[in-house]
Amino acid sequence: MLHHWILDPEAFDLIVVGQARLEHYLSSLTVVVPNRFPPLTAAERGALGRQPVCEAGRDPCRDPLADAAPGPAQTDGTAAGDAATPTHPRE
């Protein structure tokens, strides 16, 4: 468009046509996505941010990794945290 205007500046108003073309181009880049969720009710909006963070009856000081499965074996042949005496692989 700029090239055509430089060749013939009297053919069209660069500012008016350029702005209209740019706005049209930018609006063509948007994608309309339908709302997949129903709107919140007044009760749901009022409850936002008021739900408890932790589950009831859960000890907040408990280590969440304590219940995890044992880790991989250490290089000495014992599992992590195993109190058994390490043995040599060839014994």
Image (spheres, grey):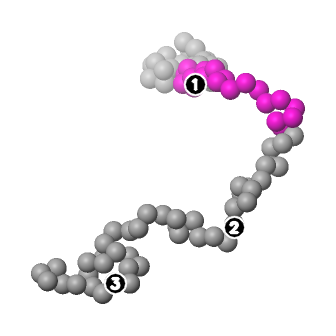
Identified by mark 1, the residue type is Thr
| Residues rendered magenta in the picture | 25-45
- The CA span between labels 2 and 1 is 46 Å
CA separation, marks 3 and 2?
A: 32 Å
In the displayed structure, 74 sits above or below 38; it is below
x and y percentages locating residue 48 in the rendered image: 80, 43
Reading the image, the residue beneath label 2 is 60
Name the residue: 56% across, 20% down: 28
Left or right of 70 on screen, residue 74: left
Which residue is under mark 1?
A: 30
Q: Mark 3 highlights which residue?
A: 84
The overriding secondary structure of the stretch rendered in magenta is: loop
Looking at the rendered image, the disc whose residue lies closer to the viewer, 2 or 1, is 2
Q: Foreground mark, 3 or 1?
A: 3
Q: Earlier in the sequence, mark 3 or mark 2?
A: 2
Quadrant containing the C terminus in the rendered view: bottom left
The three-letter code of the residue at mark 3 reads Ala
* Residue 36 belongs to the span the image colors magenta: yes
Dividing the picture into quadrants, the one containing residue 24 is: top right
* Secondary structure beneath label 1: loop
Looking at the image, which residue sits at the far bottom? Answer: 85
Left-right relation of 63 to 53 = left
Residue at 84% x, 42% y: name it. 47
